[in-house]
Amino acid sequence: MSTQETLYSVPLDLQTKFIFSTSGSASSIVRHNDAIRKLGLNLVYFTIADDITPESYAALIKSPIARGAAVTGRGGLKSTIIPFLDEVEPLAMKTQAVNTVVNNSGKLYGYNSDAIGLKTALIKGLETFGSDIKTAVIYGNGGVSGVAFHVLLELGIKVTMVGRNPQRVEEKKRQLGLEHISHFEGPYDLVVDATPISSNPDFLTAMGLQELLNGCKMVFCHNMPEKDHKINYLEQYCTNHGICFVPGKWMYNAQLAKQYRLLFEGYCKPDGSTITEQNILETWGIH
């Protein structure tokens, strides 16, 4: 820790429960814990900085001190943690992606809140920009790609998937039970970037990405370097080339609201009232 950083402390007692996460900057740790404390809950948001196996992460979430966890795409964890959970909702099984785990009396329940987040973001993008989107391509084959396939098909958009490793793309389609959906060539109306590549100033050197962007009307970017006050180079490119840009925060805000509704189920505010979605949105400063 540099001399410029300040330690962040939260009160703990024997009844304190932890909400774990496999990602989170120093600023997000403060943001989440401040919001939880404003609601008056005896919960602490704690991030795991190092890589962790799905078995170890599930064991940690199952411990008596845990209320639940956020699961990110690091190392394919959203998919690989599934066998170590007690129950998984149908949507999470269908998309092969669990991003929220709740510990209820020692049993682990897996959910996916990314789907509602992405659907909300895309609908908002269509309403905001008025674009006529008939075809889409998903770039990347990580945890959010399965969610994107599910959402785009649900919205009636013809979709395919590409990536730097064609074999991994085909394997992902097999995992999702979508191997019967044939690939088709662009240009595509919508490009869904399901990678962290927008943090790289040389992102256009990625195999095939420039070709995908040529002729597209809209881009959705899952990555959010701007959250840590860094440049989103894909957003910059879209702005310079007149392409409608749907930011990852539109997805993040909607999925966070659902995620915390799941994690807060059974909890009340100090006055005994139920915690509503509006409470979550207001406390996290989501508009």
Image (spheres, rainbow, N blue to C red):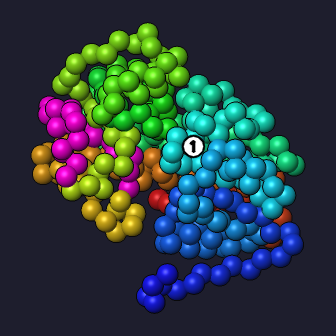
- Quarter of image, res 30: bottom right
Looking at the image, which is closer to me, 260 or 206?
206
Q: Residue furthest top?
A: 180
Q: Secondary structure at mark 1?
A: helix
Circle 1 residue: 77
Residue located 27% across and 46% down the image? 245
- Quarter of image, res 32: bottom right
> How many numbered discs sit on the rendered protein?
1
Vertical order, 78 against 183 (above or below): below
Q: Position of residue 198 (x, y in %)?
A: 29, 51
Q: Position of residue 197 (x, y in %)?
A: 31, 48
Magenta span: 202-224
Amino acid type assigned to the residue bearing label 1 in the image: Leu
Q: Position of residue 206 (x, y in %)?
A: 23, 41
**Residue 241 is inside the magenta segment:** no
Q: Can residue 284 be seen by looking at this rendering? A: no
Vertical order, 202 against 122 (above or below): below
Vertical order, 8 against 91 (above or below): below
Looking at the image, which is closer to me, 121 or 87?
87
Q: Is residue 18 left or right of residue 26?
A: right
Q: Is residue 211 left or right of residue 69?
A: left
Residue located 56% across and 60% down the image? 50
- Quarter of image, res 37: bottom right
Residue located 74% across and 38% down the image? 85
Q: Position of residue 178 (x, y in %)?
A: 47, 16
